[in-house]
Image: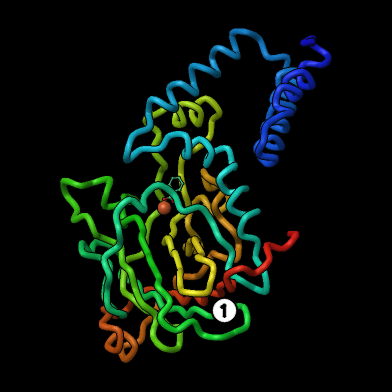
């Protein structure tokens, strides 16, 4: 029977015959945590109704290009927790972080050295890097997919009227030594979308909506686990208070100001320019998750 003291037991028991054991485990734990939460804060009927209203509006703000529930999970740190548990660093592998909602369009394949900045407003920047596996072997032909915000803090998909759709996106193929390089501009920090319920939540809790400046990097190759990560700009505002908790110290790099005419000529950069190197270590497919 259902009573206040045994409420979670009563509901958990209703799931006892769930054929899928993992589903049973998850639902049982969810009910136990939810009931403990309600008791813990002494949730009132009005507060529960406000919560239901908030979640309803969150769903109503979702469509093919907007996912307010993921954004909610992001600002609550749940996206990062799931990502971090599922992709623990093993054998020195590069740490992962959230993919985010702006990988909406496929990045155009580009030749090594090409610029991803179709609209080149901003500080010119050379990105170099290498992809090796945890055994130190170069991953020849690795695919490096990159996308980033512009110098004003916008992705191309946020300004479709004024910016070409593949601005600041590129899909590169590493050379035979696992090396890659491309030209871009230094990205700026930017706010996550605040015109929905998640924005209201941030406002009500006196939280800012900003993400520290970063370049998204996704690395894939046959035989290795796909790595989804960011390259953060050292010195960017919000590194210590990223709105979605996406910053990991190992991913923050100095984008050095470089004055080197020979190097500039070699990579077709204006001189001086900013420069960053991002050595990437990927895990072999099927390698154990590790216990953290
Ligand atoms: C992004 O980095 O693109 C992002 C991640 C989470 C929420 C919003 C944006
Ligand atoms: Fe981003």
Figure quadrant of residue 106: bottom left
Figure quadrant of residue 64: top left
- Residue 201 placement (x, y as % from top left): 50, 28
| 85 left or right of 122 in image | right
Residue drawn 50% across the image and 65% down it = 226
Report how many numbered discs are placed on residues in the image.
1
Residue drawn 46% across the image and 31% down it = 198
| 7 left or right of 188 in image | right
Q: Is residue 149 above or below residue 208?
A: below
- Residue 108 placement (x, y as % from top left): 26, 65
Say which of 266 and 93 sits in front: 93
Q: Is residue 242 above or below residue 48?
A: below
Residue drawn 16% across the image and 46% down it = 161
Q: Is residue 36 above or below residue 123?
A: above
Q: Residues within 10 Å of mark 1 (few under 14, many from 20)?
A: many
- Residue 41 placement (x, y as % from top left): 72, 19
Quadrant containing the N terminus in the rendered view:
top right
Residue drawn 62% across the image and 48% down it = 81
* Residue at which label 1 appears: 133
Quadrant containing the C terminus in the rendered view:
bottom right
Say which of 31 and 157 sits in front: 31
């Amino acid at each position: 029977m259902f009573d206040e003291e045994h409420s979670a037991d009563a509901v958990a028991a209703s799931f006892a015959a769930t054929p899928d054991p993992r589903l049973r485990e998850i639902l049982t734990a969810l009910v136990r945590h939810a009931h403990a939460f309600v008791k813990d804060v002494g949730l009132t009927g009005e507060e529960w109704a406000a919560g239901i209203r908030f979640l309803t509006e969150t769903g109503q703000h979702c469509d093919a290009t907007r996912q307010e529930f993921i954004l909610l999970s992001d600002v609550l740190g749940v996206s990062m927790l799931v990502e971090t548990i599922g992709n623990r660093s093993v054998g020195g592998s590069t740490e992962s972080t959230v993919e985010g909602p702006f990988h909406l369009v496929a990045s155009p394949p580009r030749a090594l050295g090409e610029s991803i900045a179709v609209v080149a407003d901003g500080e010119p920047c050379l990105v170099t890097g290498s992809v090796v596996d945890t055994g130190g072997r170069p991953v020849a032909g690795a695919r490096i997919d990159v996308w980033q915000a512009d110098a004003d803090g916008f992705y191309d998909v946020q300004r479709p009227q004024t910016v070409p759709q593949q601005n600041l996106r590129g899909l590169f193929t590493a050379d035979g030594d696992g090396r890659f390089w491309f030209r871009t501009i230094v990205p700026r920090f930017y706010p996550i979308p605040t015109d929905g319920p998640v924005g209201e939540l941030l406002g009500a809790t006196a939280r800012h909506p900003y993400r520290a400046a970063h370049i998204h990097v996704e690395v894939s190759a046959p035989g290795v686990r796909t790595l989804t990560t960011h390259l953060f700009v050292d010195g960017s505002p919000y590194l210590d208070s990223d709105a979605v908790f996406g910053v990991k110290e190992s991913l923050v790099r100095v984008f050095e100001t470089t004055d080197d005419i020979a190097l500039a000529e070699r990579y077709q950069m204006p001189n001086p320019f900013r420069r960053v190197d991002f050595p990437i270590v990927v895990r072999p497919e099927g390698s154990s998750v590790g216990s953290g």
